[in-house]
Amino acid sequence: MIPILSLDELKEAALYDEREIAEFFITLNFNLRSSKRIIYFSDTDTFDIHNEIDDSSWQEDLPASELASQTLIIEAIEKQAFYKY
């Protein structure tokens, strides 16, 4: 596990790589995890996020500027509860 401590670290860790999709998780109460596959596209400063908890929830072309309002990822980073597998 690698802790992600800033948006810049997330962007670097999730940078688009055609060979693999980066996997992350948020630690929740009772040692539960909310797993996510995240891709960052630096040319458009957007994220694609697959929330694996229900395997049907995708957020595509989400601008980095909207990450805090549309997801819990920024809050988890601030609480030091966001990790890369």
Image (spheres, rainbow, N blue to C red):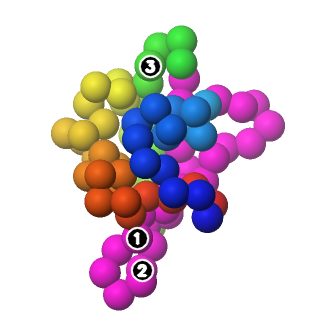
Residue pointed to by mark 1: 27
Residue pictured at 36% horizontal, 27% vertical: 64
Disc 2 residue type (three-letter): Leu
> Between marks 3 and 1, how big is the CA–CA gap?
25 Å
Name which quarter of the figure residue 13 lies in: top right
Name which quarter of the figure residue 63 lies in: top left
Instruction: Say whether residue 17 is visible.
Output: yes
SS label for mark 2: loop
Where is residue 4 shown, x and y percent of the image?
48, 50
Camera-nearest residue between 42 and 60 = 42
> Between marks 2 and 1, how big is the CA–CA gap?
6 Å
Name above or below for residue 18 compared with residue 21.
Answer: above
Q: Residue furthest right?
A: 19
Where is residue 14 shown, x and y percent of the image?
58, 38
Camera-nearest residue between 78 and 52 = 78
Disc 3 residue type (three-letter): Asp
Task: Please state the extent of the stretch shown in magenta in the rendering.
Answer: 16-41
Residue pointed to by mark 3: 45
Q: Within 10 angstroms of label 1, few (less than 14), some, or many (20 or more) residues?
A: some
Where is residue 10 shown, x and y percent of the image?
49, 40
Q: Within 10 angstroms of label 2, few (less than 14), some, or many (20 or more) residues?
A: few
Is residue 36 shown in magenta? yes
Q: Residue furthest bottom?
A: 30
Question: Do the numbered discs 2 and 1 sit on residues whose CB atoms are within 8 Å?
Answer: yes
SS label for mark 3: loop
Name the disc covering residue 42, or none. Answer: none
Apparent side of residue 9 relative to residue 26 in the rendered image (left or right): right
Apparent side of residue 7 relative to residue 76 in the rendered image (left or right): right
SS label for mark 1: strand
Name above or below for residue 72 compared with residue 32.
Answer: above
Where is residue 1 shown, x and y percent of the image?
61, 64
Residue pointed to by mark 2: 32
